[in-house]
Amino acid sequence: MAGPNLTPVDDALTHLLSRVPVTTAVETVALQDSLDRILAEDYYVPADVPPADNSAVDGYALRKEDLGAGEPLRVSARVPAGQAPQPLAAGTAARIFTGSEIPEGADSVVMQERVDLSDNSITVSAEVEAGQNIRRQGQDLKKGALALTSGTPVRPQEMGLLASLGIARVSVMARLKVAILTTGDELVDPGTPLAPGQIYNTNRFTMLGLLASAGCEVVLCETLEDTRQATRASIQRAATQADLIITSGGVSVGEEDHVRAVLEESGELSLWRLAIKPGKPLAFGSINGTPLLGLPGNPASVLVTFLVLGMPVIRKCQGHGRTRAIGETLPAAFSVASASTRREYVRARKEIQSGETHITAYPNQSSGVMSSACWADGLAVVPEGTTVEPGDLLTYYSFAELLA
């Protein structure tokens, strides 16, 4: 249930994702520089991983059938890691180390703690199963298998997997180029004394941090003059440099809200005013073919709308295999007495109460209270037309998941 002329969040998100293009630019980077980048191609396994049977422990490789009732086995070889072993002589054992290749003829490895060593012979003091402590060739990945798909974000574990394939340079999507434009003659940068009527530019730095976390490259960062002409010139200049423009403020109905007007006059405005709280005055369109996402001006609204709507857009543009965040269902430890026509994203955090995890809301949900987001660790969703009593189940998104 959305209010008059307000677009529901789900419809807005579907619209946004249908209208922004996937950036096609690709670059190749060294494996050590690939963290948090998006793979631009599929990677297949060039050879079995591991390439040969190897030992999972330090110990002794042997044939199970050579073990008699307490009879010792002569140690006939030493197999250090990184060297190809000779075949194991019948009736003997080979000293072997973790990661060392299993010598031909051996079918088991006994941990050194399960062996008594005397006069270069061993006596095994434990039961032995054929194949124990052996990591088989290809047990991780088989030659020709698909290891990683295009669109996969590279985490430390993907870096390790690529290394296991022998990949030294990785094909990744080029970083998305984003322009940040904040509006308001009252805005000044931190470090500057405030004159009457001025405030510090909170939104610029919130968006810089969010875009850095999202792996984007900020190519332009400006505060716009509150005139139609200056706003148009800055937006048009940004469109020549960026893949995506993100603005804050200037999209409501005031006389000084020029961003929406410039989109209507000089580009395309395809979405305006959402059934979301906070953040109703959000606009989307394009200027000279470059998409523009116009966020509201209040600091908490910027954060919420960027996470809920901006991040899926960025993931889509980056070629990310997953655009939408995945939430979890948890009971509320707060109440909402009045149902709203807008979907509310409550700054909240998880807390343990009576041994169970609940969602606790920050007491002041005003869109200007940025300290609420520092206290919180995520957003709890109160659906449209819904009241909340303690214990009611809500969807909760952690900030980490929203930025993943």
Image (tube, rainbow, N blue to C red):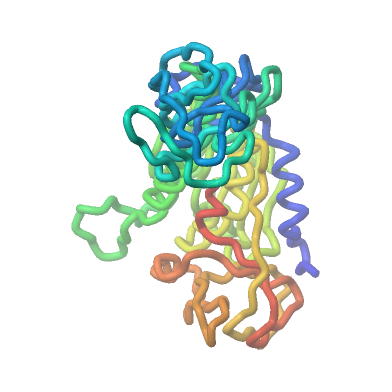
- Residue lying at the far right of the rendered structure: 1
Relative image position of residue 353 (x, y in whole percent) = 52, 84
Image quarter (top left, top right, bottom left or bottom right) of the N terminus:
bottom right
State which quadrant residue 345 falls in: bottom right
Tell which of 331 and 113 is nearer to you: 113
Relative image position of residue 14 (x, y in whole percent) = 76, 47
Relative image position of residue 228 (x, y in whole percent) = 50, 43
Residue 344 in the image: above or below residue 39: below
Question: Relative to 192, is 393 on the left or the right?
Answer: right
* Residue pictured at 74% horizontal, 79% vertical: 386
Relative image position of residue 59 (x, y in whole percent) = 43, 34
* Residue pictured at 68% horizontal, 43% vertical: 269
The answer to whether any part of residue 215 appears in the image is no
How many circles with numbers are drawn on the protein? 0
* Residue pictured at 67% horizontal, 18% vertical: 143
Tell which of 375 and 110 is nearer to you: 110
* Residue pictured at 64% horizontal, 52% vertical: 325
Tell which of 289 and 347 is nearer to you: 347
Residue 340 in the image: above or below residue 141: below
Question: Relative to 352, is 371 on the left or the right?
Answer: left
The answer to whether any part of residue 332 appears in the image is yes
Question: Relative to 261, is 340 on the left or the right?
Answer: right
